[in-house]
Image (spheres, rainbow, N blue to C red):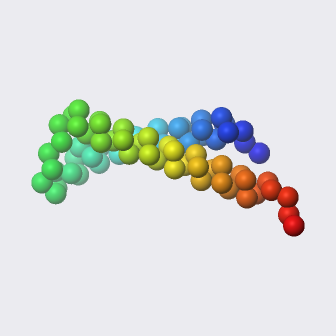
Amino acid sequence: MQSRLDSLVEAVCNIGTGFVLALCVTYWVLPLWGLEPNGRAAIEITLLYTVISIARSWVWRRAFNWFHCRPSE
């Protein structure tokens, strides 16, 4: 079983690799909908979603570890 810290590190690594992809999507795809973020805005938007994604991944990981490791009835 993973410790809470190990779960957080895994989530950060997983989401961190997606950060670059998300940044590119934010910067290059949003203009297709008429939104023109500058570099700073694209980074800020991506950071917000990245923090949310890290928290979500960590919560799900902990929930599944709890369900998996609890004693069976």
Residue name at image x 71 percent, y 52 percent: 65
Residue name at image x 12 percent, y 54 percent: 34
Quadrant of the image occupied by residue 27: top left
Quadrant of the image occupied by residue 5: top right
How many marks the image carries: the answer is: 0
Q: Position of residue 11 (x, y in %)?
A: 56, 42
Residue name at image x 30 percent, y 42 percent: 45
Residue name at image x 76 percent, y 57 percent: 68
Q: Position of residue 56 (x, y in %)?
A: 51, 50
Q: Is residue 46 left or right of residue 63?
A: left
Q: Is residue 56 left or right of residue 43?
A: right
Residue, far top: 40
Q: Is residue 46 left or right of residue 50?
A: left
Q: Position of residue 39 (x, y in %)?
A: 21, 34
Placement of the N terminus among the 4 image quadrants:
top right
Q: Position of residue 61 (x, y in %)?
A: 63, 50
Q: Is residue 48 left or right of residue 54?
A: left
Placement of the C terminus among the 4 image quadrants:
bottom right
Viewer-nearest residue: 48 or 24: 48
**Can the viewer see residue 52?**
yes
Residue, far bottom: 73
**Can the viewer see residue 18?**
no
Tell me if residue 39 comes above or below residue 52 in the rendering: above
